[in-house]
Structures are given as structure tokens and as C-alpha cells.
Amino acid sequence: MKNRIEMGLDFKVDKLTNSIENVKSGDSFPTEISLLTNAELKGLTKKNGWQFNWASELKAPAREVYKLTISNNPNIIQGVVSLEVKSDHVHMHLIESAPFNIGKNKTYLGVPGNLVAFVCKVSFQRGGEGYVSFIAKTKLIKHYIKSLGAVQFGGNNMMITTEAALKLTNKYF
């Protein structure tokens, strides 16, 4: 596998909700997070409005790729996250909301927050004490500090600590 260039994440946390929330009605919907399968990749293409190459993420041996769906509606993917479990934390490589959950006409709020909270939960479960690292785009560093409680630790490197991870996981799980 050729070397990958780690780029900064470029997601906006629109709202921290208890699950995901319909923008128009304000109704809240319980969610489920499960592993993304090869069969589901055909819908996650640039042609369908997705920005990242999720097939490449799924092929990377050390990475785990998860999808967020509404409970009882597993065929519509609301968002996707790629992570790697390290010895003392979890690194979040990519995160993306479904095209219909981006911009001013989005359908649901809370997708990115839900996915990040899940990554924190994985970190707790796998011995990382909730610690999650990721690389941020420069323009979003302050946003991640404010919305996620992340801290900057050199350049564009960000870390969610145990305390912030607890707040996120308690909100969603």
C-alpha cells in the first residue's frame, strides 16, 4: 500500500444533540453505528456527493470504518468515520456527513458530534481512556476547541482528552 498523506479534517460540528435531530421538525432520532461493508461502498461515491474515497479507507489494514444510521433505517447512511486504534489512544483519520447533511439545506443536525462521540467511546473501550487525536484544517482549530473541547498540541494536531471525551460520550451514549 502506498504512503498516505494525512490531511487536516474539515468537518463542522453543527450541534451537539442526544442523537440526530431533524432540522425542520426538531424531532430527535436514535442512531446506530456499525462497521461499513464493501457492499455499501457503491453509494459513497463522488458522483453521489461524497468527498472522500471510502473504499481506500476500508482497504487500509489498520483502519476501521464505521457508518452512522438511524435506528430501524440501516440503508440510509447519515455519516462515516475512519479511525485507527493506537496503543494509548484512537486516531481519527476521516469523518464525513452524508451530502444531504451538509450545508444550509441539511436534513439532520448532530451527525459529526455523534461520530466523534463514538470514536471517544471506542477509545474508552480499547484502553485509550477516551483520548482521540486528529489533524485539523487551520481554519477549524478554534471551532474544535469550542465545540468538542479539543486541545491543540502542536501545529494542526488536536487531541480530545478524557474529560472532553466523557462529556461527548455521556451526551450521545
Image: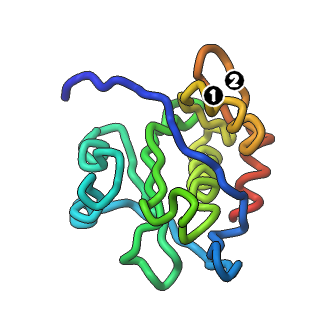
Q: Horizontal placement of 93 versus 137: left or right?
A: left
Near mark 1 (Cα within 10 A), the count class, few <14, some 14-19 or many ≥20, is many
Disc number for residue 158: 1
The vertical placement of 54 against 37, above or below, is above
Q: Quadrant of the C terminus?
A: bottom right
Q: Horizontal placement of 149 versus 119: left or right?
A: right
- Residue type at the position of mark 2: Gln
Residue placed furthest toward the top: 154
Disc number for residue 22: none
Q: Quadrant of residue 126?
A: top right
Mark 2 sits on what residue?
A: 152
Residue placed furthest toward the front: 104
Q: Residue at x 57, y 48 (%)?
A: 119
Near mark 2 (Cα within 10 A), the count class, few <14, some 14-19 or many ≥20, is some
Q: Secondary structure at mark 2?
A: strand
- Residue type at the position of mark 1: Met
x, y (%) of residue 67? 43, 61
Mark 1 to mark 2 CA distance (whole Å)? 5 Å
x, y (%) of residue 131? 65, 36
Q: Is tag 1's residue or tag 2's residue first in the polypeptide sequence? A: 2
Q: Quick one: 121 or 158, which is closer to the camera?
A: 158
Q: Residue at x 63, y 70 (%)?
A: 20
- Asked if the residue at tag 2 contacts the one at tag 1, i.e. Cβ–Cβ closer than 8 Å, the answer is yes
Q: Secondary structure at mark 1?
A: strand
Report whether residue 56 is seen. Answer: yes
